[in-house]
Image: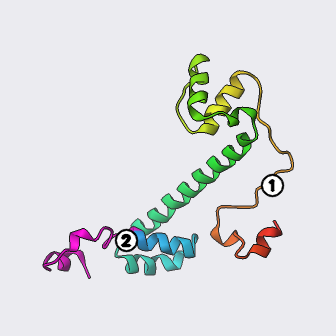
Amino acid sequence: MTFEKRLGLKGDWDNSPGLFRPERLLDILISINSDPPDYIFHTIASFVWLTENDTRQYFTEQHEKFRHELREDLEREKWKGHKLFANNVDALKEMCRKKGLSAKGPKHHLVERIATATNEGALVDENYKMTYTGNFQSIPSSISNLRKL
């Protein structure tokens, strides 16, 4: 049902959050196939009542978001083994302030700033190999396949 037709209906429509949000459908479609072929965007756009350009833009923005989250996760893993990571965030913020460093950001950024300022460096596992590429299809679908990693 289009938004315009819905406006003419009497009822408690506004108490149904997200009822007419194409993002919900797009999120489901992205979870099914995060990188659809070009020829299918027209069909996806028709399905979610958006233009093809808006649909492509949404997929692009979500890919950027995935890549950013992946970089953050890798940075967190890199600094998680550092001895400073055992401190709570408030203690790390206080250490940053004492050293004249920015006290903003997630815990691993605080640890990185302090360790860099004190020349302690990161504890990087040289054998660490990233197997996730940002493509949902590369994620193992069973426990046995996860164990093979």
Query: Disc 2 marks which amino acid?
Result: Pro
Q: Of residues 52 and 130, which is closer to you in this image?
A: 130
Residue 77 colored in magenta in the image: no
**Residue at 50% from the left image edge and 75% from the top image edge:** 29
**Residue at 22% from the left image edge and 74% from the top image edge:** 13
Question: Dividing the image into 4 quarters, which one contains the N terminus?
Answer: bottom left
**Residue at 35% from the left image edge and 72% from the top image edge:** 50
**Can residue 83 be seen by looking at this rendering?**
yes
Coloring applied to the structure:
rainbow
Q: Where is residue 147 in the image (x, y as percent from the top left)?
A: 81, 69
| Residue 47 versus residue 91 in the image, above or below | below
How many marks can you see?
A: 2
Q: Where is residue 85 in the image (x, y as percent from the top left)?
A: 69, 36
Q: In the image, is 26 to the left or to the right of 115?
A: left
How crowded is the residue under tag 1: few (<14 C-alpha within 10 Å), some, or many (20+)?
Answer: few
Point out the stretch of residues depicted in magenta.
1-23
Q: Where is residue 49 in the image (x, y as percent from the top left)?
A: 34, 76
Q: Quadrant of residue 52?
A: bottom left
Q: Of residues 26 and 83, which is closer to you in this image?
A: 83
Q: In the image, is 81 to the left or to the right of 109?
A: right
Instruction: Indicate the secondary structure of the residue bearing disc 1.
Output: loop
Name the residue that disc number 2 marks: 22
**Can residue 37 be seen by looking at this rendering?**
no
Query: Disc 1 marks which amino acid?
Result: Lys
Q: Quadrant of residue 66?
A: bottom right
Q: In which quarter of the image is residue 31?
A: bottom right
Name the residue that disc number 1 marks: 129
